[in-house]
């Protein structure tokens, strides 16, 4: 029973993620399964729950409702800003992701939905909010987590810290950081046009 997925197991998972219309929005590369620590909320709850009890070699189709995935699309998270509120020279185009960081380094990522004159419409919802997610998964491996992995809440077998992989999810090599010299302003912008959906 040691290879059955349960709390405190490190799971290697090959997966393909499709939307209801069949569009593939994410997948693990061949030979590079996703690794996560089961029971530690490394992955969305609706998927994690359906993986419990599976073992190496098992395949499964999992349908996750928005509430158990990336949440419902919240219209209150759409914000229109005037370009004058944004840093000068900030590159903007529809579809681009922009990270807004506050002084505590909390990052909120928004997608540019529309540009109309000086008005920029940002959507702060997760790109997959409101979507029913269709996962095709194959369990590649299941092993016991180490005490350190359990303490950290993530696996360490990727050659680096798990959180690094996640922190870099919206990063790319053309990061643009903005520091506002003016007092009393929480603005720090990082621009990013990586449209990866891998975040959880
Ligand atoms: Zn760690």
Image: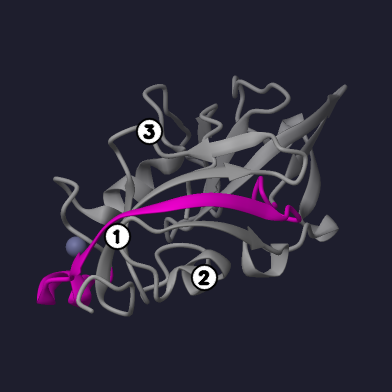
Give the number of the disc on residue 33: none
Q: Is residue 133 magenta?
A: yes
Ligand 1's image quarter is: bottom left
Specify whether 53 is left or right of 124: left
Q: Are marks 2 and 3 in contact (CB under 8 Å)?
A: no
The image shows residue 87, relative to residue 182, as above or below, that is above
Q: Which badge, 1 or 2, comes first in the chain's sequence? A: 2
Specify whether 17 is left or right of 112: left
As measured in the structure, the alpha-carbon distance from the residue carrying label 1 to the one carrying label 2 is 14 Å
Nearer the observer, 87 or 49: 49
Q: Is residue 142 magenta?
A: yes
Q: Which badge, 2 or 3, comes first in the chain's sequence? A: 3
Residue at image coords 31%, 46%: 165
Nearer the observer, 52 or 150: 52
Magenta-highlighted residues: 125-153
Residue bearing the label numbered 1: 56
Q: Confirm if mark 1 falls within 8 A of ligand 1.
A: no
Specify whether 145 is left or right of 31: left
As measured in the structure, the alpha-carbon distance from the residue carrying label 3 to the one carrying label 1 is 18 Å
Q: Residues within 10 Å of mark 2 (few under 14, many from 20)?
A: some
Instruction: Please tell me whether mark 3 sits on a helix, a strand or a loop.
Output: loop
The image shows residue 193, relative to residue 159, as above or below, that is above
Instruction: Please tell me whether mark 2 sits on a helix, a strand or a loop.
Output: helix
Q: Position of residue 92 (x, y in %)?
A: 66, 23
Q: Which residue sits furthest right?
A: 116
Q: Position of residue 39 (x, y in %)?
A: 37, 76
Q: Quadrant of residue 42?
A: bottom left
Q: Confirm if mark 3 falls within 8 A of ligand 1.
A: no
Badge count: 3
Residue bearing the label numbered 3: 29
Residue bearing the label numbered 2: 50
Q: Position of residue 79 (x, y in %)?
A: 79, 48
């Amino acid at each position: 029973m040691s290879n059955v997925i349960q709390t405190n197991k490190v799971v290697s998972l090959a997966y393909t993620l499709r939307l209801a219309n069949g569009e593939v929005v994410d997948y693990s590369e061949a030979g590079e399964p996703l690794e996560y620590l089961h029971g530690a909320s490394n992955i969305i709850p609706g998927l994690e729950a359906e993986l419990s009890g599976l073992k190496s070699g098992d395949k499964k189709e999992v349908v996750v409702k928005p509430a158990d995935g990336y949440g419902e699309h919240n219209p209150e998270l759409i914000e229109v800003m005037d370009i004058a509120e944004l840093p000068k020279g900030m590159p903007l185009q529809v579809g681009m992701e922009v990270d807004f960081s506050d002084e505590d380094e909390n990052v909120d990522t928004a997608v540019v939905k529309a540009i109309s004159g000086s008005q920029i419409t940002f959507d702060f919802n997760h790109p997959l909010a409101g979507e029913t997610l269709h996962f095709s998964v194959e369990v590649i491996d299941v092993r016991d987590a180490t005490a350190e992995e359990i303490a950290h809440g993530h696996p360490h077998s990727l050659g680096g810290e798990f959180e690094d992989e996640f922190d870099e999810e919206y990063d790319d090599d053309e990061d643009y950081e903005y520091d506002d010299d003016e007092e009393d302003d929480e603005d720090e912008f990082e621009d990013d046009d990586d449209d990866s959906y891998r975040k959880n």
